[in-house]
Amino acid sequence: MRRRKEIVSALCAIIAGGTLAVAVAGFQGRGGQEGPKVARIEKVKDNLYYIFEPASGGNTAAFVTDSGVVLVDAKNPGWGQEILRQLHTVTDKPVTTIINTHTHRDHTGSNTEFPATVEFVAQENTRNNMAKETCTALGNCQSFKGENAKYLPKKTFKDKMTMGSGKDRIDLYYFGPGHTNGDAIIVFPMLRVAHFADLFARKAVPNVMPFDGGSAVSLPQTLAKAVAGIKDVDTVITGHSTLMTWKDVEEFAGFQREFLMSVQEAMKANKNADEAAAAMVKTLTVRYKDYTIAEPKTKENVGLIYDELHRTGHYVQ
Ligand SMILES: [Zn+2]
Ligand SMILES: [Zn+2]
């Protein structure tokens, strides 16, 4: 008993010591939520890294080019310094460009913590979402009012754009509505890597945000277009999970297609959204074992699809 107590207190000391070191390293003297902000950086391939930590928001890619660093996504507000701190462990080059994959706060949150000389880039609908008069807190348009409008993307694209050339080339794609109406997929063709952001956040029933133009009905088609339209990628940076493979993207696109088809069948069979969701959780969990398929989220998405199909008149019995 006594020995156990000793072990416990020794463990506590280790944990406390570790936490303290972490807290000192990551303390941010800014307003808002104070506390340790510590992320991690890992090499994806060659000159491409990603910076991650669940509480920080979406995964940030850091592409070190000849002329400077291109970041993909800027995490939650207050994480700018920690992005730079991690970045400086691998390069001395300055950040020249930030690509925002979509409007959400956990991907655009620290735009305003970088020098305004940084070039901000986004799909045109995302730029419009960021510049909206009003939006939800997640939509983050509040952050770009007045003086801060200078942190809005000035360089935008519609369907496809290429930046840089040779080994520094980046291809930006937009395939249609999904998580929002402006989700960009960022491809590093020479490295065969793509950042899917919240179009493929994790292996789970996805978050679809109608307030920001997202569409649960269009999502499977958008992903199918991405799978068909993007060539020669083997490694994928997800929005909020670990690195994955192109096969994982194909599987995820298949999951979304199956999800939508199941909802359409349930509608034809006159099941209500709750009945449909309960049945789908059972079948999908068997087929997609490493996916998070919780009943509340499934119900929510089934409800979104029901609403959307009724509203658009695409559902004719
Ligand atoms: Zn996100
Ligand atoms: Zn998002």
Image (cartoon, grey):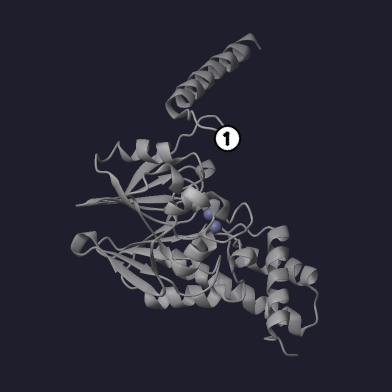
* Frontmost residue, 240 versus 181: 181
* Frontmost residue, 150 versus 275: 150
In the rendered view, does 168 fall on the left or right side of 196?
A: left
Q: Furthest residue to the front?
A: 146
Ligand 2 lies in which image quarter? bottom right
As helix, strand or loop, the secondary structure at mark 1 comes to: loop
Q: Is residue 30 above or below residue 242?
A: above
**Quadrant in which the C terminus appears:** bottom right
Q: Furthest residue to the top?
A: 2
In the rendered view, does 304 fall on the left or right side of 113?
A: right
Quarter of the image for residue 41 reads top left
Whether residue 58 is visible here, answered yes or no, is: no
Q: Residue at image x 47%, y 49%?
A: 148
In the rendered view, does 15 fall on the left or right side of 1?
A: left
Looking at the rendered structure, the number of numbered marks drawn on it comes to 1
* Frontmost residue, 278 versus 2: 278
Q: Is residue 2 above or below residue 231?
A: above
**Position of residue 27 measured from the top left corner of the image (x, y, whole percent):** 47, 28
**Position of residue 226 measured from the top left corner of the image (x, y, whole percent):** 43, 73
**Position of residue 202 measured from the top left corner of the image (x, y, whole percent):** 53, 57
- Amino acid type of disc 1? Gly
**Position of residue 230 measured from the top left corner of the image (x, y, whole percent):** 36, 73
Q: Which residue is mark 1?
A: 32
**Quadrant in which the N terminus appears:** top right
Dot 1: few (<14), some (14–19), or many (≥20) neighbours within 10 Å?
Answer: few
Q: Is mark 1 within 8 Å of ligand 1?
A: no
Q: Residue at image x 36%, y 73%?
A: 160
* Frontmost residue, 48 versus 156: 156
Q: Residue at image x 67%, y 69%?
A: 283
